[in-house]
Amino acid sequence: MREAKDERRPAGGLEASIMAALWAAGAPQTPGQVQRSLGADLARTTVTTILTRLYEKGMVTRERQGRGYAYVPAQDAPGLTARRMHSELDTDADRETVLARFVAQLSAEDERVLRDLLDGGAGAGTGGNQ
């Protein structure tokens, strides 16, 4: 009995690791290159499957490279987070309540940043460091 086999990654953990590897590379990566950069005990076919799923979700783009593909993130990390937030918001019919509860749970600093962004303040999207 192998207990290591029973240990599961958290949902989305492998996708997140692969996205991090693609962002770090800064250039199109084949599944084999991603596999090597992860340094994990993963089969290339597993990495290929996850990259294909990320492509189908629109999280990566791909270009033909030889007989396979090389993959590139479709957005940077903040853009992807914003996209996930929109996706979650779109799944609920009561957008006003969802937004109200989201804002109610913001820290004072995050609320200030959000107010500045909504008012069209300087530093929009840069963390206000301009």
Image: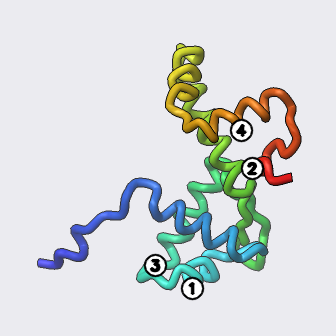
What is the distance, in whole Å, between disc 2 and disc 1 at their CAs?
A: 33 Å
Callouts 3 and 1 close, C-beta under 8 Å: no
Q: Give the secondary structure at mark 3.
A: loop
Q: Earlier along the polypeptide chain: callout 2 or callout 4?
A: 4
Amino acid identity at mark 2: Gly
- At 59% from the left and 15% from the top, the residue drawn is 96
**Residue 10 horizontal side relative to residue 107, left or right:** left
What is the distance, in whole Å, between disc 3 and disc 1 at their CAs?
A: 10 Å
Mark 3 vs mark 4, foreground winner is 4
- At 63% from the left and 47% from the top, the residue drawn is 81
Q: Give the secondary structure at mark 4.
A: helix
Work out whether residue 10 or residue 126 is closer to the camera in this orientation and state it: 126
> What residue is shown with label 1?
36
What is the distance, in whole Å, between disc 2 and disc 4 at their CAs?
A: 7 Å
| Res. 43 mark | 3
- At 63% from the left and 50% from the top, the residue drawn is 56
| Res. 127 mark | 2
Callouts 2 and 4 close, C-beta under 8 Å: yes
> Where is residue 121, by image quadrant?
top right
Mark 3 vs mark 1, foreground winner is 1
**Residue 78 horizontal side relative to residue 11, left or right:** right
Q: Is residue 122 above or below residue 6?
A: above
Amino acid identity at mark 1: Arg
